[in-house]
Image (spheres, helix red, strand yellow):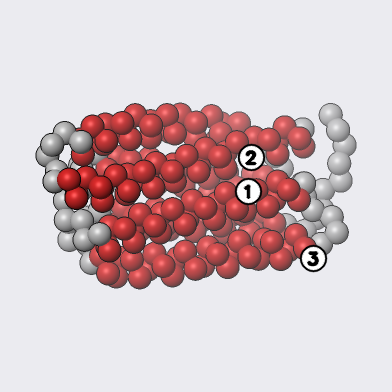
């Protein structure tokens, strides 16, 4: 095992945990957006605020990297992880915004299953971030994220089959496809984050 002295400063771990917690908030708002009685304008406003908070955390990560001489792991990995988390939040914000501005009135029922996958990915990621400091109990995380991503792929195919079934008008199909693809990309983003964490753990072991 390669010996390495880890900095005592926990700032990076705290910031990554904060960033992942923003994703839990965003996934919750996305689920709320699908509700029949949702005030979509209000949900979209709160999502924009949450996305702004997430951006602030990402900027804090980048600023911290540029301020310190010794980092807990490779700078490139810190940038990649911070960017990966931020990209997911951007995609969730995009989904909420499209539902609002496209004025989508009817969503495929299976979309709720996909959002549930997204919520679970967010919860697991938030729970895993504090474990970065000790590099322990992370393998179960990336294995489960991979399983959830496969579930997301299956959901994605079912949703596409539904929207192309002839049940929806052509213009609605175009709107829904944009939303479905962005949602799939967000779930894929969690797998990329899990892969980055796996690479970091392997380097540090």
Comparing 177 with 197, the one in front is 177
Residue 192, relative to residue 52: is it above or below? above
Q: How far apart in space, not on screen, are marks 2 and 3 (Cα)? A: 23 Å
Tell me if label 1 and label 2 are in contact, CB under 8 Å: yes
Q: Are marks 2 and 3 in contact (CB under 8 Å)?
A: no
Q: Residue furthest front?
A: 170
Give me the disc on residue 81.
1
Residue at 67% across, 61% down: 61
The reply to whether residue 112 is visible in this rendering is no
Q: In which quarter of the image is the N terminus?
A: top right
On the rendered structure, is 126 left or right of 61? Answer: left
Q: At 50% from the left edge and 42% from the top edge, which residue is drawn?
A: 190
Relative image position of residue 193 (x, y in whole percent): 57, 42
Q: What element carries label 2?
A: helix
- Residue 67's tag is 3
Q: Are marks 1 and 3 in contact (CB under 8 Å)?
A: no
Q: Position of residue 201 (x, y in %)?
A: 70, 36
Report the Cα–Cα distance between label 1 and label 2. 8 Å
Image spot of residue 141 (x, y percent): 55, 35
Q: Nearer the viewer, residue 124 or 194?
A: 194
């Amino acid at each position: 095992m390669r010996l390495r002295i880890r900095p005592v400063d926990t700032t990076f771990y705290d910031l990554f945990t904060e960033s992942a917690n923003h994703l839990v908030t965003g996934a919750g708002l996305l689920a709320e957006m699908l509700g029949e009685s949702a005030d979509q304008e209000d949900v979209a406003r709160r999502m924009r605020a949450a996305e702004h908070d997430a951006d602030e955390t990402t900027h804090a990560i980048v600023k911290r990297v540029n301020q310190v001489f010794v980092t807990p792991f490779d700078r490139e990995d810190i940038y990649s992880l911070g960017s990966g988390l931020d990209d997911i939040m951007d995609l969730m914000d995009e989904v909420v915004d499209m539902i609002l501005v496209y004025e989508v009135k009817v969503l495929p029922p299976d979309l709720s299953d996909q959002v549930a996958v997204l919520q679970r990915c967010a919860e697991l990621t938030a729970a895993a971030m504090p474990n970065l400091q000790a590099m322990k109990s992370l393998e179960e995380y990336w294995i489960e994220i991979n399983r959830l991503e496969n579930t997301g792929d299956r959901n994605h195919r079912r949703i596409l089959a539904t929207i192309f079934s002839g049940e929806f008008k052509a213009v609605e199909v175009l709107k829904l496809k944009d939303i479905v693809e962005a949602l799939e990309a967000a779930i894929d983003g969690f797998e990329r984050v899990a892969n980055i964490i796996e690479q970091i753990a392997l380097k540090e072991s």
